[in-house]
Image (cartoon, helix red, strand yellow):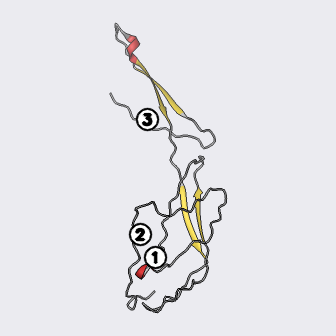
Amino acid sequence: VSFTLELEFSCSVLLDRAEVTLQATSDGTEATPDDNVVKLSVPIRYEPDLFLSSNTNLHRYEVHPLGTFTHSSGPEFTTTVKVQNFGCYPIQNVTLHMALPALGHHQATILSVTHVLADNATCVLQPPPEGTQVVPVPPEDLLHTDR
């Protein structure tokens, strides 16, 4: 006989383990009834309900034709990234890695991070690990693109 148990847990009570006792009985006589009981204890892992969103204050940026760009910096903009827990269970040790496109055609810098502000988080700005090849964004022909 096989059993499938499906358990539901309350958001108000967080448990570390679930314990289940199964006992098989019958009307017949058995010489060793002690082996008809099993106690199971399994760790509980809760599924997170995380939501990742981002917003920026720069919704339009003018791109000059290839070869006519200047080496001056463009407009400053702010991008906000939020990681929200919509579940009822606390989440710990969440790590978010973001790779930002920083080089364009002919290794031209197209993005430089000037500062990072963190609310209820620890943020570390790190260069790519040693030996990681940064692939530049290739030039594109956008003449036939509506947006």
Q: Mark 3 belongs to which amino acid?
A: Leu
Residue bearing mark 1: 103
Residue bearing mark 2: 134
Residue bearing mark 3: 5
Compared with 72, 119 (above or below) is above
Marks 2 and 1, the one that precedes in the sequence:
1
Percent x, y of residue 121: 63, 56
Left or right, residue 67 beside residue 77: left
- The residue depicted at 47 percent of the width and 73 percent of the height is 101
In this view, the residue farthest toward the front is 130
Percent x, y of residue 138: 38, 80
Marks 3 and 2, the one that precedes in the sequence:
3
Compared with 12, 130 (above or below) is below
Compared with 79, 89 (above or below) is above
Say which element carries label 2: loop
Q: Mark 2 belongs to which amino acid?
A: Val
Disc ID at residue 78: none
